[in-house]
Image (cartoon, coloured by chain):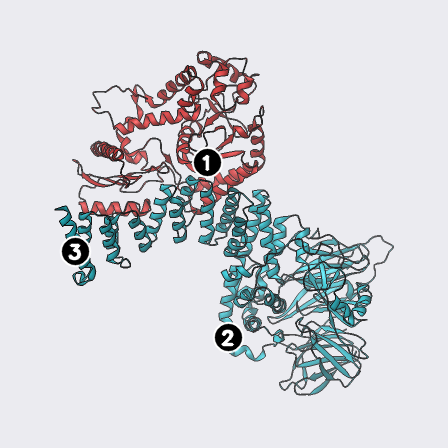
Amino acid sequence: MASSSSSSQFVRRNIAGSGALSHVYIQYPPFRFNVPDSSRMIYDDGSRSLLVPSGNKMFSWPVTWQSHSDTPNIIILENSHVLTARFSLDGKILAVQNSDYEVSFYNRESGVKFKHPSRSHTERILGLFWTDCPACDVIFVTTGGLELFALAPKLDAVKLVDVKPSQVSWYSYTHESRLVLLASGMQCKTFLCYQFSAGGIIRLPKFDASMRKVDETSKAAALTPKDVHIATMYGRVYCLQVDRLAMELNVYRFYRDAVVPQGTLPIYSDTVAFSVVDGVLLVHQLASKVVLLYDIFADLNTPISAPLPLLIRRDIAFTAVGTSEDSDISSHTESKKLGSTESNIYGDSWNFANPDIILDQENGILWKIHLDLEALAASSSNVPSLLAFLQRRKLDALLAKQLSMTVLHAIIIERRPLSLISEAMDVVNKSYSQFLRTRAASTITRQQATRSQVSASGNQPAHNRVTVEKDTSQSSITTDVTPEASGNVEKSLEDLSLSEAKSSSSVNALEEGQEVDGTVEDTHKSMTSDTIEISKNVLPSIAQGNVTVSAISPEEMHFHVFVLINDEMEVEASFLAASIIQYMQSAVTEKLKVPAEIQVLLIDLLAREKRYGEIMHFVRTKVVDPSKEVAKQLLQIGKSYHPIFMLGLNMLRQLSFHGEYLSEILQQGRLLEALRYARQNRVEAVPPSTFLELAAASHDRQKLACVMRFCLDFVPSFETTSEYQTYSAVLNQQKLVLA
Amino acid sequence: MILVIEKRKESGELGRTRALQAILMEAHGLFTLFYGSIRALLLNSPSGDVARSCLQAFLPDYISDVMTVKRLSMLSSHSGLQERGTIQMMALDRSTALEVQSVVDLLQSWFGSGRIHHTLLLFQDLLVSTTLPPEDAAHLYTYARMRLIPAAISTSSGGHSLKKVLSRANSSSVHLKASASDITAAGQRPSPADSSNHHSQFFTPRPLQHDKWWRDNDGFLVTDAWGVDAQGMSAITPTVWLQQSSQERMKLVAYQHKQLTVVMLISVMHLAPNADGSHVLRNQVLEKASNKLNALEDRLSKEWGGINANHVPGYRYLYVDYDSRVSKASPAGKIATLTKDSLLSLDKVRSEIDIAKGRCDGSGEAQPYELETCVRTRSNAWVVVRIRGNHELYLVLERASETLLLTAEATEKFSRRHCDGIFASD
């Protein structure tokens, strides 16, 4: 996907980053609204919008991070009492819970309003959420269990479809995981989970949160919704549960028919909050105001970074955080307000919404959390695991890719041990071959999707407010393909990830790659929207081609790492050559094609140190693939070492580059052999005049006569050409001279 | 050098001149490998003592190797499809070749840049990879094949106590004494071993003596052919001279795991005086590289096609690439199935060609020598020779009914499949 044009625009990243004051930041300016009399903000993760009730109006903004000054959508409410509210997944209907017993629906397009009272007055409604599950559209969570409703065809009423009774104290739901967790029991430590996905409804086995008994007398407090968090990381669904007494965080992973504990992490603060940014788990230690980062694919027991505070980043130019404000910003009227919010980091009014949103209820501000990849890269000393981490980035894939290449560049320049370089190359190539595999799988999926699209397009959820053209096809895959896969539920211990389509179309796709599959619409969408934003500034050419990924193709490896190092001349040729060998070796084990340019560079490096024997060995054992480029390079080098010249010549012949071969042997003056070759291989590209000229120039009468004879015999109607006239004259003249 | 051979009536012929010359070339190559060039020896000690003692030490050992019961073993009748002094390569898959190269690079990188200058990897008696230029590679390969490969090293491994080493060294060196200062002058600088031996007697190394190499418990090959140190505690690390690459003296360290032999050359120049780098190297190889090397051995032994790996059914062939000094031939067992008549014819054709080639070399023509010959022998076999510059192909086809056209076609096919089409006639 890399084009040579992109190389000119390639901006090399400096790992120095932002001085490693933080690894996580929130970008100034935040999303801010001005609604009089607003009391609180609601973030609806299903429709990705911010809802602010005020009086009898409901203001809503799509949260896209592209245009912050969007004018809000306003819906007039009948009842100004709002407990919670959520838009339907297509954004048409707003459901507002007015009280414990009543929910109102507002159709934004038709203006139809209707109410739905609770079934019985014994069961309070705890909350509600919309779903893309085929069986129902909206689900109420009540103290008596789940109530599943479907919308009437005219969208003017809801009809009860099913009830899943169970005792519920409180619940937790994230749209990203489509998973609802119902807590029950005295200590609220018995959890029952359902997943309502496009693939159908899955009921997961009940499980108990593990609470370590510190001593017999102390009574563990009941778990609250704040203690439990559903996190979606790399498409896998996890449950994080805080054990306050033991100061531990228990991690569970959901499978289709099991919930498996994954271990525990220590926590260092009474109150913690969680965010997931691009698959990385952020544990905010609220009391100590620092954040710890964990990567489930790395070692879960050790955070990937030192505990550092969350910082506000003030400008786009990636300069160090904490510098004095720019003049234009300070002139901004909001800057004063920000001063108060700044000191408010991890303040009481902060709400952490799934997955990476912070709502500052007091100041009416919405922040989005970002990873500072540069700082992370700068602070990491373990190169292979850093590269693996960078290669897993989807959100800021372009930056991750650039950073990865910078790291690779640096380890070669710094002459780090070759074994380390070899490991690093393995990481890079594995990730690229995985990307290729998942892309291949997703093309198949896409083809299937387009076939069935016509029939399924009716109930396609319209999340496409993110306005990325190519995204429409991606999200539709989910709706179209997943029904096919719903039959595969019987697989035991299958990942309860979001990509149900995986079982049918991309079984071999590993977990990491699933998002590229286009099946996880939410993460995917945010990824595309973000990368588009960046690429507008940096690299428009890549964005047009495909979804930007962090995987580094062999071509990019060549242009942005090897060629750069070669040009800088800071490393001796032998070390770079050894690094390239390591790269090629790992590429071949991953069955990647090594572009001819890299091989040409390798030969060039070896030739610089006059290691001709090795070049010959490489060509003989096909370590260096035969190609036109390689052959030309061999011919070039062969000028100073003849056997290599012969090798290049033979390679040209083997690959049937007749024209090039002929011109080479003609240069050597092997005229008759060239004629033979031209006749044997029916080469017509070289005109007879070339041969004749050469023969005449040799002043060898016999040779010229030979060529003339050849032309007369094999070139049709040669006698009529002007060349025949010219050269028979020359021949006669030479005869005369001789006589 | 002059080689005197007794003409034996029963065999009736002497063998090709070139084949005999090849023996001399090989002897010379090995001699320079061990002692440096004779010219350098003479320059350093004009009296010729050193050179003479070296030759005295070397030639009997070499000749004893070449001769079997008063007869040159190389002059058996099927020598026509063998070429002395060339390297037999192991056929490798592309990914295996890359793996080998990667391991070799890692091996060289682990010990600081420039410490290991060159490596030579052998699997059984086949060369897997080398970083040496062809000439030096061929000499070292010849030596490794003669003395270092698993089939050649002393089987009585482990039984060698240091005491035994010492006694051996003393007894073998009595008649080969030379003054220590002379030998030191021959080298570019005194090796640690030389200086430590300064006051004791010195002996000229005899690398070709039989049963002088054995395998230590840690997988390294040891020899006392280069003597023992002053205390008689350990054998001196062998040193060799490279001619083509750097004219430099190198310490030779060899490691063996099952069928895999790794010969590492460390520049003497890069070693601190009085420090035998090989001990450090040995520890590091054991620590870091042995896993990789063992894995590589596994992979190579899986890929090895057996002793008949190079056999091409229907053909008995020899392909020599004099550029990289590599040859590929039918396995000896298969050559033996040819009739004596065909082999004699081949020998005759080859000696004719040798003469023609010699004439061509003398004329100093720039064009590469090219030749195509098909000869029908008395026993209705075909002897085919094709020469393209420094690449030569000899084929013997024993299919009586074949016409010249079919033979040419068969040759063409062979060239395409097994020689990268070098010998195509067009």
Residue B257 coordinates in the image, percent (x, y) = 49, 33
Chain ID at mark 1? B
Dots 3 and 2 on the same chain:
yes
Residue A22 is labelled as none
Name the subunit of mark 2: A
Q: Which residue is mark 2?
A: A452
Report the mark closest to the observer, 3 or 2: 3
The amino acid type, in three-letter code, at marker 3 is Ala
Tell whether label 2 touches label 3 (CB within 8 Å).
Answer: no
Where B370 falls versus B199 (above or below)? below
Q: Secondary structure at mark 2?
A: helix
Residue B216 percent across, percent down from the top left: 52, 26
CA separation, marks 2 and 1? 58 Å
Chain painted cyan: A
Is disc 2 in contact with disc 1, using a CB cutoff of under 8 Å?
Answer: no
Residue at 69% of width from left, 71% of height from top? A45
* B208 displayed left or right of A702: right
Q: Chain of mark 3?
A: A
The red one among the chains is B
Q: Residues within 10 Å of mark 3 (few under 14, many from 20)?
A: few
